[in-house]
Image (cartoon, rainbow, N blue to C red):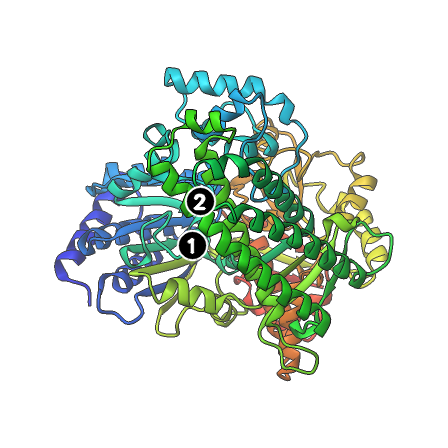
C-alpha cells in the first residue's frame, strides 16, 4: 500500500498542475495515477508492474509523470521514460517534463540518453582526417553501410573538427545541421564492442561519456525502447542504470515485444562476415612483425591468421550451402524457413564446425586484446608503435575488441543452428530461416525466439525495481491475452483499461455495400478506384489508409489527377513535411488528402478540420510473409490451436482500432470512418472485431 505522505505529494502535484494549466481533472487520468503509484510504490511487491491501456485523450503522459516522479524519488530509483518514437522522446523532453517542472511543484533533473552511434567518435574522426579518409577501424557491421560517398566526407569532417574546437557543436550527430549519410556516420561512429572507453586518449572530450556522466546525476532519463533493450542484451547497467535501480515507463508499449525480437535475433550476413574476416586477416598480417618486436607471443598471430583463413573458407562453404537451399528463381529476394525450426543434419554439422572455430578465435582474440591492453598500460607510446611499423595502439585495441565481439556474435548464431532440433524432433520455440537479396554475397541466416515473453521476463520484468507499460492500444478483442503472451508480463501485474473521455458517438463507422472483397485484389482495387473520388468529394481533411503499397499505388495512378484535393503520399516526402503541408492546405481553406500505409495507422495526430474522414481500404490483416509470424502459426497448429483466430484476428482488430483512432483527437472532433471491406459483416470473425471498436454510430451495409 502506498505511503500516506507520498499519496499526499502526488495529489498536491496533480492539483497544482491542473490548476496552473487550467486543465479539467479527468476521471481516467486519476485512475491511471492511482494504478501507477500503487504498482511502483511498494518496494516489497512481488510484481511491481502496471499495464495500463489509456484511451486517446486520457492524458496518460501527465498521469505517469505526476505519479512516477515522486515514487522514484522516494525509493531512490532512476525514472527511465522509454518511448518507441523520436517524436514522443522530444515531446517528453522539451514539452511535457518542463511543463510538469514549472507547474506541479516537483523538482527533478532530466536528460536524454542515446547510444554511442548517435555521437561522433573522436578517435575515429581524428584518424579519418590524418589518414585522408581511410577507415582506421575494421567495421563490425560492414554489411549495414554502403561505401558510396565516403570520399566526399572530408569537408564535412573538417567542419566537425572546427565546430568541436570552437564549441559550437558538442558531438551529438542528431544536432549536426545537415543530414548525414549512413556511410559518413560509419566513418565517425563506434559501438560498445569497439569503444576503448576509459583507455581512449580522447576520453576527457568524448561526447558520449560526457552525456553518460549526466545520466548518473539525473533523476529522469528519457530514451527509447531500443536503447533499453540494447542495454539489457549487454546484461543491463552498461549503457543505462541497472534494472534493479530503475523504474521504467514504456510509452507506446504495444511495440515493445516486436522491438525485443529485433534486438535479440541472431544474424549471419555472409557478405559482411566475410569482409570483416578478410579485413581482420590483412590487419593481423600487417601488424604481426611490429607486435612481435613489442614482445607479443610470436606464435599467437600466425595461429590467429591461419584460423581466420579457415573461417573464411568455412563461411563461404556454408553460404553456398544456404544458397542452394533457397528457391531458384529470378526474384530479387528469396527466403527459406526451416519448418518447426528443424535444421537438416548436414547443416547442423557445418554449424557445429563453425561453433568450434569461432570459439577458438574468440579465445585467441581475447588473448590478443589482453596483450595489447597490457602493452598499452605498460607505457608503449603511439610514437614507438609507429617506428615499429604498427598502427596506433588505440586502434589496434579497438580492432581486437571488435574481433572478440564478432566472434561472440557468430558463436551465438551458429550455436542456435548447431543445437537446433533435427528432422522428427519437436520444435524448440525458435524460428530459423535463410534468405538472399539476389546474389550469393547477400545470403544471410537468422534465428529468433518465436515469442519474446521469456526474454523480457528474464531480462526485464523480474529484475526491474518497477515498470509501467502504457499505450492507447494494448488490448485486442477486449482482452490483454495477446499482449500478455507476447510481452511475458507476469499475471500478478496490475492490468487496467482506462476509457477515452471522448464521446465515440460523435463519429460514424461505415461499412458500405461492396461488389468485391479483398480476396480478389484486382476487382477490389478497381472498385476503390471507382468509389474513392465520390466518397471523399465533400471532405476537406481526409486520411486514406492502405495495407498494400501495390494497391495504394494502383489507386493513385488512376485517381490522383481527378481528385480535387491536394494529394500527399507517404514516402514521397518526410512524414513531418507531409503533415505540415496538409495542415497548411486545410488552414488555407483547401482540401487535402493523405495516402498512407501501415505506419500511418498510429502516431498521426490531425485534430479538428485536419481530419474529418478516415478511409481504410481493407481490414488490416498482416501479410503472411514474416518468418517469425509463420513459425508462430505453425507452433499453434502443432498444439491443435487456430492461429487465424488467435493471432490474425486479434492483431487486425487492434490495428483497426488504431486506424479508427486517427479521427477523434479532441473532445470537439467529429467525422466518419469508412472501411471498404465487407468481410467485417460477412465473416464469422467480424462480430468480435466490431464489438472491440469504440461505441461509434454504425452504418453497416
Q: Secondary structure at mark 1?
A: loop
The picture places residue 142, in percent across and down from the top left corner, at 62, 41
Q: Position of residue 545 (x, y in %)?
A: 66, 49
Q: Quadrant of residue 499?
A: bottom left
The residue beneath circle 2 is 192
State if disc 1 and disc 2 touch (CB < 8 Å): yes
Q: Position of residue 558 (x, y in %)?
A: 83, 41
Would you place residue 596 above or below residue 362 in this image? above
Residue lying furthest left: 5
Pointer 1 local density, CA inside 10 Å: few below 14, some 14–19, many at least 20: few
On the image, the x and y values in percent for residue 574 come to: 61, 34
Q: Earlier in the sequence, mark 2 or mark 1?
A: 2
Reading the image, the residue beneath label 1 is 234
- Residue 409 in view of the camera: yes
Quadrant where the C terminus sits is bottom right
Cα gap from disc 2 to disc 1, whole angstroms: 9 Å
| Quarter of the rendering occupied by the N terminus | bottom left
Choose between 326 and 467: the one closer to the eye. 326
Q: Can I make out residue 168 in this image?
A: no
Quarter of the view holding residue 247: bottom left
Instruction: Identify the residue at image location x=26%, y=54%.
Output: 67
Of the pair 350 and 545, the residue shown nearer to us:
350
Viewer-closest of 304 and 421:
304
Amino acid at each position: 500500500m502506498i505511503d500516506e505522505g507520498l499519496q499526499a505529494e502526488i495529489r498536491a502535484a496533480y492539483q497544482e498542475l491542473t490548476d496552473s494549466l487550467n486543465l479539467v481533472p479527468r476521471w481516467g487520468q486519476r485512475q491511471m495515477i492511482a494504478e501507477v503509484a500503487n504498482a511502483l510504490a511498494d518496494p516489497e511487491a512481488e510484481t511491481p508492474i502496471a499495464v495500463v491501456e489509456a484511451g486517446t485523450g486520457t492524458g496518460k503522459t501527465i498521469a505517469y509523470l505526476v505519479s512516477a516522479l515522486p515514487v522514484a524519488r522516494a525509493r531512490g530509483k532512476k525514472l527511465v521514460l522509454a518511448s518507441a518514437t523520436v517524436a514522443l522522446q522530444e515531446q517528453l523532453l522539451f514539452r511535457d517534463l518542463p511543463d510538469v517542472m514549472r507547474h506541479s511543484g516537483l523538482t527533478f533533473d532530466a536528460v536524454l540518453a542515446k547510444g554511442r552511434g548517435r555521437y561522433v567518435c573522436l578517435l575515429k574522426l581524428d584518424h579519418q582526417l590524418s589518414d585522408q579518409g581511410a577507415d582506421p577501424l575494421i567495421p563490425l557491421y560492414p554489411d549495414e553501410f554502403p561505401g558510396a560517398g565516403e570520399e566526399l566526407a572530408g569537408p564535412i569532417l573538417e567542419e566537425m573538427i572546427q565546430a568541436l574546437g570552437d564549441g559550437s557543436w558538442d558531438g551529438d550527430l542528431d544536432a549536426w545541421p545537415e543530414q548525414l549519410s549512413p556511410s559518413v556516420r560509419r566513418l565517425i561512429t563506434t559501438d560498445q564492442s569497439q569503444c576503448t572507453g576509459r583507455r581512449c586518449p580522447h576520453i576527457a572530450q568524448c561526447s558520449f561519456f560526457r552525456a553518460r556522466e549526466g545520466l548518473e546525476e539525473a533523476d529522469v532519463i528519457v530514451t527509447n525502447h531500443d536503447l533499453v533493450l540494447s542495454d539489457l542484451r549487454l546484461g543491463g547497467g552498461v549503457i543505462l542504470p541497472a534494472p534493479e535501480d530503475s523504474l521504467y515507463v514504456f510509452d507506446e508499449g504495444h511495440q515493445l515485444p516486436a522491438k525485443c525480437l529485433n534486438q535479440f535475433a541472431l544474424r549471419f550476413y555472409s557478405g559482411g562476415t566475410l569482409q570483416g574476416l578478410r579485413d581482420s586477416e590483412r590487419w593481423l598480417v600487417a601488424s604481426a612483425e611490429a607486435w612481435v618486436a613489442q614482445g607479443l607471443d610470436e606464435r599467437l598471430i600466425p595461429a590467429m591468421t591461419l584460423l581466420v583463413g579457415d573461417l573464411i573458407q568455412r563461411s563461404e562453404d556454408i553460404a553456398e550451402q544456404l544458397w542452394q537451399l533457397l528457391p531458384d528463381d529470378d526474384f530479387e529476394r528469396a527466403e527459406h524457413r526451416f519448418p518447426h525450426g528443424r535444421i537438416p543434419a548436414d547443416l547442423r554439422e557445418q554449424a557445429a564446425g563453425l561453433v568450434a572455430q569461432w570459439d577458438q578465435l574468440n579465445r585467441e582474440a581475447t588473448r590478443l586484446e589482453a596483450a595489447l591492453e597490457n602493452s598499452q598500460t605498460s607505457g608503449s607510446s603511439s610514437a614507438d608503435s609507429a617506428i615499429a611499423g604498427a598502427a596506433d595502439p588505440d586502434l589496434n585495441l579497438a580492432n581486437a575488441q571488435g574481433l572478440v565481439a564478432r566472434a561472440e556474435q557468430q558463436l551465438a548464431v551458429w550455436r542456435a543452428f548447431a543445437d537446433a532440433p533435427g528432422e522428427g524432433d519437436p520444435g524448440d520455440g525458435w524460428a530459423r530461416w535463410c534468405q538472399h537479396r539476389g546474389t550469393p554475397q547477400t545470403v544471410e541466416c537468422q534465428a529468433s525466439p518465436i515469442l519474446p515473453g521469456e526474454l523480457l521476463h528474464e531480462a526485464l520484468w523480474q529484475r526491474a525495481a518497477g515498470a509501467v507499460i502504457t499505450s492507447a492500444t494494448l488490448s485486442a478483442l477486449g482482452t490483454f491475452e495477446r499482449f500478455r503472451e507476447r510481452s511475458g508480463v507476469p499475471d500478478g501485474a496490475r492490468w487496467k483499461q482506462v476509457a477515452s473521455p471522448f464521446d465515440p458517438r460523435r463519429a460514424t463507422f461505415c461499412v458500405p455495400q461492396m461488389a468485391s472483397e479483398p480476396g480478389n485484389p484486382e476487382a477490389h482495387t478497381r472498385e476503390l478506384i471507382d468509389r474513392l473520388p465520390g466518397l471523399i468529394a465533400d471532405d476537406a481533411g481526409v486520411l486514406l489508409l492502405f495495407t498494400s503499397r501495390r494497391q495504394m499505388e494502383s489507386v493513385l495512378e488512376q485517381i490522383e489527377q481527378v481528385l480535387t484535393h491536394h494529394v500527399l503520399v507517404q514516402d514521397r516526402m518526410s512524414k513531418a513535411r507531409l503533415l505540415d503541408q496538409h495542415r497548411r492546405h486545410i488552414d488555407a481553406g483547401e482540401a487535402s488528402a493523405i495516402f498512407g500505409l501501415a505506419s500511418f495507422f498510429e502516431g498521426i495526430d490531425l485534430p479538428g478540420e485536419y481530419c474529418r474522414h478516415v478511409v481504410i481500404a481493407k481490414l488490416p490483416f498482416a501479410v503472411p510473409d514474416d518468418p517469425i509470424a509463420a513459425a508462430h502459426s505453425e507452433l499453434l497448429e502443432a498444439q491443435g490451436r487456430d492461429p487465424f483466430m488467435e493471432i490474425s484476428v486479434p492483431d487486425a482488430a487492434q490495428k483497426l482500432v488504431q486506424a479508427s483512432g486517427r479521427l477523434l483527437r479532441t473532445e470537439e472532433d467529429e467525422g466518419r470512418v469508412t472501411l471498404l471491406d465487407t468481410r467485417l459483416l460477412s465473416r464469422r470473425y467480424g462480430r468480435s472485431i466490431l464489438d472491440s471498436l469504440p461505441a461509434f454510430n454504425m452504418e453497416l451495409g
